[in-house]
């Protein structure tokens, strides 16, 4: 975040809702501050200088996320190396970029199959060979992302495919 004003040289603190954040005085007219993750809404940013303090409102907007699940390959003839692998892809809809390092939980019915972390391409995978009968019985699987302070929760359903 860039904060503009006058008399900013010698600033001693920048806070968000009273909590200090890292900042750099760029010039007498500008400070850059690193704002922490926060849920959508308005916060108060306060700059303190030798000349006093000033507060300004700042509004966080929450990123939207999308989770897409691919159909489960539940039976392959002849056997294929990808048989029994469930996948889900997590994408930030605002930027179109994949969300890496995020946990995704795979379930079928009321059974949790696994929780996997998305890779650099935003893809989470879950080996499901032992659960294939249960996945078939439940008509597929569900991938769930709980969300974070910067991203909304998302859920997607993967259907059953028999090859």
Image (cartoon, rainbow, N blue to C red):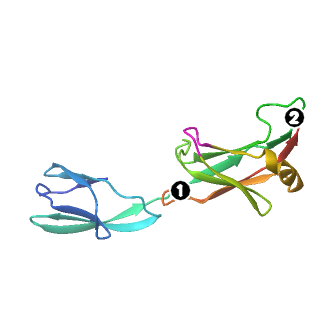
Q: Where on the picture, by quarter, is residue 22?
A: bottom left
Q: Where on the picture, by quarter, is residue 17?
A: bottom left
Most extreme residue toward the top is 78
Number of callouts: 2
- Please give the residue where the numbered disc 2 appears in the rendered image: 76
Q: Is residue 14 above or below residue 159?
A: below
- Please give the residue where the numbered disc 1 appears in the rendered image: 151
- Name the residue rendered at 43%, 62% in the picture: 38
**Residue 36 % position (x, y):** 37, 58
Main SS, magenta region, reads: loop
Task: Read off the magenta span.
Answer: 118-123
Q: Is residue 58 above or below residue 117?
A: below
**Residue 63 % position (x, y):** 52, 54
Q: Is residue 84 left or right of residue 5?
A: right
Most extreme residue toward the front is 130
Who comes first in sequence, dot 2 or dot 1?
2
**Residue 41 % position (x, y):** 44, 66
**Secondary structure under badge 1?**
loop
**Residue 123 % position (x, y):** 63, 42
Q: Where on the picture, by quarter, is residue 11?
A: bottom left
């Amino acid at each position: 975040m860039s904060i503009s004003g006058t008399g900013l040289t010698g600033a001693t603190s920048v806070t968000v809702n009273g909590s200090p954040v890292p900042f750099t005085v760029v010039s007498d007219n500008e400070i850059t501050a690193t704002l922490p993750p926060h849920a959508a809404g308005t916060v108060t940013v306060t700059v303190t200088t030798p000349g006093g303090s000033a507060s300004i409102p700042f509004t966080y907007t929450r990123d939207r996320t999308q989770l897409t699940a691919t159909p489960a390959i539940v039976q392959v003839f002849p056997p294929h190396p990808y048989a029994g692998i469930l996948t889900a892809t997590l994408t930030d809809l605002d930027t179109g970029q994949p969300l890496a390092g995020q946990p995704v939980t795979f379930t079928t019915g009321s059974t949790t199959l696994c929780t996997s972390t998305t890779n650099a391409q935003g893809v989470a995978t879950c080996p499901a060979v032992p659960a294939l009968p249960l996945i078939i019985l439940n008509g597929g699987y569900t991938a769930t992302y709980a969300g974070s302070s910067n991203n909304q929760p998302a859920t997607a359903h993967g259907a059953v495919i028999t090859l």
